[in-house]
Amino acid sequence: MMRTDGFWAGLLLAVTMTLPAAAQERVLGLDVSYWNTGNNQAAGSPGISQANWNTAFTDGNRKFVWARATRGGTTGQGQTSGTPGGGSAETLMRRYDDPRFVQNITRATTAGMYAGAYHFGRPDIAGNTGADEADHFIQMAGAFMRAGYLMPVFDLEAGQAETTPTQLAQFTLDFSNRIYEVMQIRPAIYLNGNYSSEMQSATLAQRNQLAQPVGSGPTMTGPAYPMLWDARYPNNDDPNSIPVQTGSPKTTPSTNSSYYGPWDDYGNTDPWSFWQYASTLSIPGINAVDSGVDGNVAHGDIEYVRNYLIPAVWWNDTSGDWSSLANWNSGQATIVPIQAAGQATPFAGGALPPPRLPGAAGAGPNSGQYDTVILERPNANITVTLATGEHNVRKLYMRETLEITGGTLTINYDPTYRANNSATVLHGGPLSAQFSGAVSLIGSGNLNVHTLQIDAQRTFTVGSTGTLSFNRINLMPHASAAAKMLLSGDLNVTPLGGAAAAIGVGSGSGVAGTVDLGGAARTINVADGAAATDLTISVPVTNGGLIKQGAGTLALTGLNTYAGDTSVDTGVLSLSSARLADAADLFLTTGATLNLNFVGTDVIDSLFVDGVSLATGVWGAVGSGAAFTSPLLSGAGLLQVSTFASPTPGDFNGDGFVDSADLTVWSGNFGATDAGTAQGDANGDSLVDGADFLIWQQNATVASGASAVPEPAALVLASVALAAAMAARRRNG
């Protein structure tokens, strides 16, 4: 890039800058244009070859690059010297198309670098407009303004002398707004301290539009330039001495307080994301063609860099299917660069990126696994349905309605990743996904996510036969409407990576979020991982009954208020306080464990083991000193059992349910005399006959918690069983 910052007069001195990979915390990169490719327009000239790019990635340890695509407006010609297209005339808006752009960006991504395009602005040319320059940029680089590539950049280093601060700011805003209008994404800005300080003299409204963050997460609605790429050269004579791992543009060395312009007006005193720290680097591979190129450093690690890849965004204001290409910016037809009059023929660069879905399978830096998905339509309320397929994205910001009814959505970003814990290295952020709209995991859908935040006043509904695999779910508090996780059916949990999973309260003040059982008995099935406790729910569990299944351990540590029964069928349920409802029953099954992990006594109504009601009195673990003990209980707590419950008529196997298993008992003993309940005698007359069947039918349930009226299928089954039993009786008579 050209430099006019006035801070340092760069002396182009070839200096090799290679640091051992192990020393890297902040990630290193570069930027290039035609002038770094050998300045050779001859047909067949290799420019920066693929082998050169490969070496820059490996030996040079350069992991990202921006390549110039365009300069100026859509018309005319603009080249001060060495015009690749021939001649030296400058006319109209001084259009310039970099003939090496597609070649550079394609080879860089093939080498493994994250790559993006930049446009050199010409607000100094009378008649140029920001919108027209954006159109020029889109014409030539629109193919790469899609998920998988770094944010497009507006390079602002001209026009300070020819415009007022408000004119310059408006030109810059118009450029961003046109990119957003056409491509539905926002660009980044490249400038130096002179130009950012100039922006500080724009109007307050302009400054806010340029740099003020909008909301709590990334959004395409604003600001106009959410990423700041700053240029300052502390020591171009000896770039190896620049402390790129710990320094910053403003403080290396210290400079004026308004250096960052409006970008540090909103609470972030060090707002740069990328720093162009020298223009004299001799980078392995690139130095075979140009021994003095621009060097850059990210403010953070590789996950931080990935934050600035173009997001996958929903394309229209209508509801639709996640799996439809037409619904995504990444799925739109590729914009093929044009051949404008007076411009040099571009060098062959290989195939342009094809349309694809967010999270599409692939290899390399622009594959779908690195996509951040932002689902938001500011002017509409839409529903996105994910019903089939495997979709593996990096992050998800959900501000509309999402229904996962089938297939699998994996959100793979791990917020705990640290290349290095240095305080000067920024990371990828604390969340894998943020649900700011209604999300449902139902049907056969599966969701895998490390750290999920459910915003206040929002509900995450789960009732899928599939699996929810996670590390942590944060339910955000609120004064009156905290986040809620609503179970509309069963919850099947597999702790991510076998580690301990948790559902807890997010940061902030107010009422805690809840896990709402939806007014019914809900099964929470927890798989057994490597942790001692596989799932901890520290928020209140409310409104229903709970059935613990799965070999894993579920710990309830919140102020639970659910009033229904509790069943522990398999695995371990651990309670940290005596909060079972006094009028509710507790059902235990042999092989399962209830851990009373508290001091004191919890009052319940009845206690059942394998469907058999146990005696009233105080129960505890073996060795607890309680009047009654059971090997199915552990911990220091005690249970005060208030009621001995007689078996429900028709519950012949004593499991607490009147169902098809009991019908099997009755039909197998039909005609028996001197029989008891266990043989199918429901009315106590010592006979197993049709009267007992009618009692079973009256009390039968098709599932736990269902009504006592059997559905047609159950009646058919009963009729068949009755007929078979009577036929057997006749044969035996």
Image: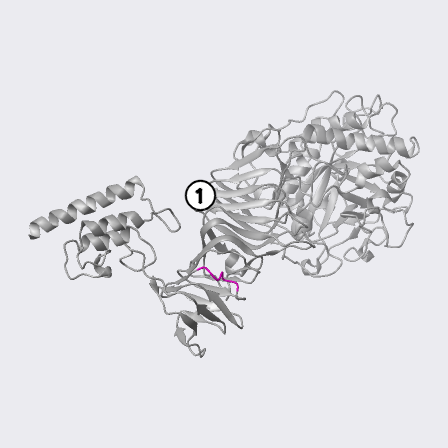
The count of marks equals 1
For residue 154, above or below residue 395: above
The residue identified by callout 1 is 444
Q: Is residue 610 visible?
A: no
In this rendering, position of residue 675 left or right of residue 304 = left
**Rendering coords of residue 730 (x, y %):** 8, 49
Quarter of the view holding residue 107: top right
Label 1 secondary element: loop
Quarter of the view holding residue 362: top right
Q: Is residue 191 visible?
A: yes
Q: Residue at horizontal 39%, vertical 72%?
A: 631
User: Which residues fall within the magenta stretch?
Assistant: 579-584
**Rendering coords of residue 148 (x, y %):** 62, 40
Q: Residue at horizontal 83%, vertical 47%?
A: 264
**Rendering coords of residue 270 (x, y %):** 81, 51
In the image shown, does 446 or 61 lie closer to the viewer? Answer: 446
**Visual colour scheme:** one colour
Classify 10 Å Cα crowding around label 1: few (below 14), some (14-19), many (20 and above): some
**Rendering coords of residue 223 (x, y %):** 76, 38
Tag 1: residue type? Ser
Q: Residue at horizontal 70%, vertical 55%?
A: 509
In the image shown, does 503 or 243 lie closer to the viewer? Answer: 503
Q: Quadrant of the N terminus?
A: top right
**Most prominent secondary structure in the magenta stretch?**
loop
Q: Is residue 630 magenta?
A: no
